[in-house]
């Protein structure tokens, strides 16, 4: 995906295997990545590095750490979209107000490489990912 080449992604997850898997997929598409193990560390890194997208786990050191991180990023770096990655992603995408948390998408773990790349590309372009368009059409 040429449109992702050179773009920056911050991966925030307390699981090293998930961070590594997401990083490998993103870097295979030409993205520059950084990793963080906590919401606080991720916020500090985002402030310094200014990523084009943040992909964060919902449940890290606190049960809503990813959602809290998204809210803080929305306030401090309003141009930085956040994608939430969660084991309960499908349920979340149907039950939360994305705008309340500043989220651009929610993905279900485990996420396929294609779905991850398609969603990241859509979010960086400013498009609504397919899952959000489907959800809006159902309402």
Image (tube, rainbow, N blue to C red):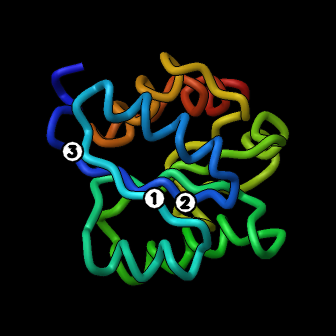
| Left or right position of 89 against 98 | right
Crowding near pointer 1: few (<14 within 10 Å), some, many (20+)? many
Quote the CA–CA distance across marks 1 and 3. 15 Å
Q: Nearer the viewer, residue 102 or 9?
A: 9
Residue 39 spot, x, y in % from top left: 59, 74
Q: In the image, which is nearer the foreground, mark 1 or mark 2? A: 1
Q: Which residue is mark 2?
A: 12
Residue 35 spot, x, y in % from top left: 45, 58
| Left or right position of 82 against 125 | right
Q: Residue at x 48, y 30 (%)?
A: 129
Quick one: SS at disc 1? Answer: strand
Quote the CA–CA distance across marks 2 and 3. 16 Å
Q: How many marks?
A: 3
Q: In the image, which is nearer the foreground, mark 1 or mark 3? A: 1
Q: Which residue is mark 3?
A: 7
Q: Which residue is mark 1?
A: 35
């Amino acid at each position: 995906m040429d449109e992702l080449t050179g773009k920056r992604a911050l991966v925030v997850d307390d699981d090293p295997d998930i961070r590594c898997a997401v990083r490998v997929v993103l870097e295979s598409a030409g993205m520059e990545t950084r990793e963080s193990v906590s919401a606080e560390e991720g916020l500090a890194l985002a402030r310094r590095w200014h990523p084009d997208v943040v992909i964060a786990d919902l449940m890290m050191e606190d049960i809503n750490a990813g959602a809290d991180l998204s809210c803080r990023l929305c306030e401090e770096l309003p141009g930085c979209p956040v994608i939430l990655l969660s084991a309960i992603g499908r349920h979340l995408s149907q039950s939360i107000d994305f705008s309340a948390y500043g989220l651009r998408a929610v993905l279900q773990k485990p996420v396929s490489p294609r779905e991850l790349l398609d969603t990241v590309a859509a979010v960086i372009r400013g498009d609504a990912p397919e899952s959000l368009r489907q959800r809006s059409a159902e309402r």
